Image (tube, rainbow, N blue to C red):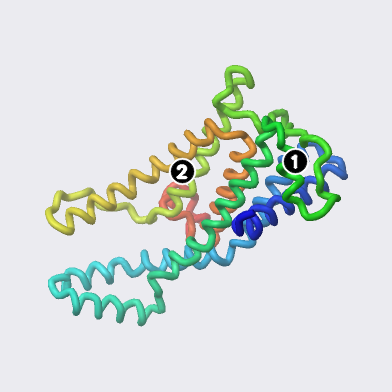
Amino acid sequence: MNPFDSFLINPILNLLLLFYKGFALLPIPGALGFAIILLTVVIRLALWPLISAQLKSTQKMAALKPHLDRIKSEHGHDKTRHQQEVSKLYKEHGVNPLAGCLPLIIQMPVFIALYQVLLKIVDFSKNDFLTNINDRLYSPFLFLEKIPDPSYLGVSLAAKPSDWRTVGFLILLVPIVTGILQYIQSKMMSPSAKSPAPVKKEGKEGLEDSMAQMQSQMILIMPAMIAFFSYGFPIGLSLYWNTFTIIGIIQQYIIAGAGGLNKYLPEKWRK
């Protein structure tokens, strides 16, 4: 068994089954769905400090952009002087440009492992489903004697929105909600100030404008992509993703405010 399974996938799977067994003992209808939600919340809260550091670093970098633009206009022709002034600015404001990247790098293996676990636990179609799951568990108490009931709020966690013709039309709400939540989070991460109308430029300035325009387009493209993936994935994965996104929206608002959504909020809710 590879180290990724031993140190990430198996511990997360065991934690998920522990939650599932707890909900099943109560008993609570939809135990597997509630276990997925609780697992997602626990992992998201465990990653809260790392994500907070990433958000705060991004916020600081955004606040320094006017200063960076000024330095570039004054010393852009001299690469050495430009780098010296930028380093000086970062030092004065206590900003490390890499601080926003490191937390993201650390989070990625956890995200991948969580995704893999949920993909395994809702893939009931495999003949060796129970064997594959039980072989990864640490305690006989967690062993599954039968396939978990996939029902959650009247829908099977293994169902896919792409099967709406047989499952029902309402299941198409899942990718729609997924896309909307992702759009809200993406919009919150964009600057709150309205950008001026683009002016055609040449050279490096024109390239920067093109990059800014591309970032603006990604606010729409990414939610559309996530919604498309959600259309073909089991509902259990969308349940995890939407829970993760909702907590992300809350964390984003607490730390950095509503960003690009500020103008749509009442004055008292703006940050």
Compared across the picture, whether 266 is left or right of 78 comes to right
Q: Callout 1: 10 Å neighbours few (<14), some, many (20+)? A: few
Pointer 2 residue: 183
Residue at figure coordinates x 71%, y 37% from the top left: 129
Compared across the picture, whether 55 is left or right of 170 comes to left
Q: Quadrant of residue 71?
A: bottom left
Q: Callout 2: 10 Å neighbours few (<14), some, many (20+)? A: many
Pointer 1 residue: 131
76 or 127, nearer to the observer: 127
SS at mark 2? helix
Point out residue 167 in the picture as x, y percentages from the top left corner.
64, 21
Please determine whether, in this image, residue 190 is positioned above or below residue 239: below
Residue at figure coordinates x 69%, y 56% from the top left: 11
Point out residue 46 in the picture as x, y percentages from the top left corner.
64, 62
Amino acid type, residue under disc 1 in the picture: Thr
58 or 123, nearer to the observer: 123
Point out residue 100 in the picture as x, y percentages from the top left corner.
44, 66
Please determine whether, in this image, residue 152 is positioned above or below residue 16: above
Q: Of callouts 2 and 1, which one flags the residue occurring earlier in the amino acid sequence?
A: 1
Residue 195 in sight in this render = yes
Front: mark 2 or 1: 1
CA distance for labels 2 and 1 = 39 Å
In the displayed orientation, state which residue is furthest to the front: 1
SS at mark 1? helix
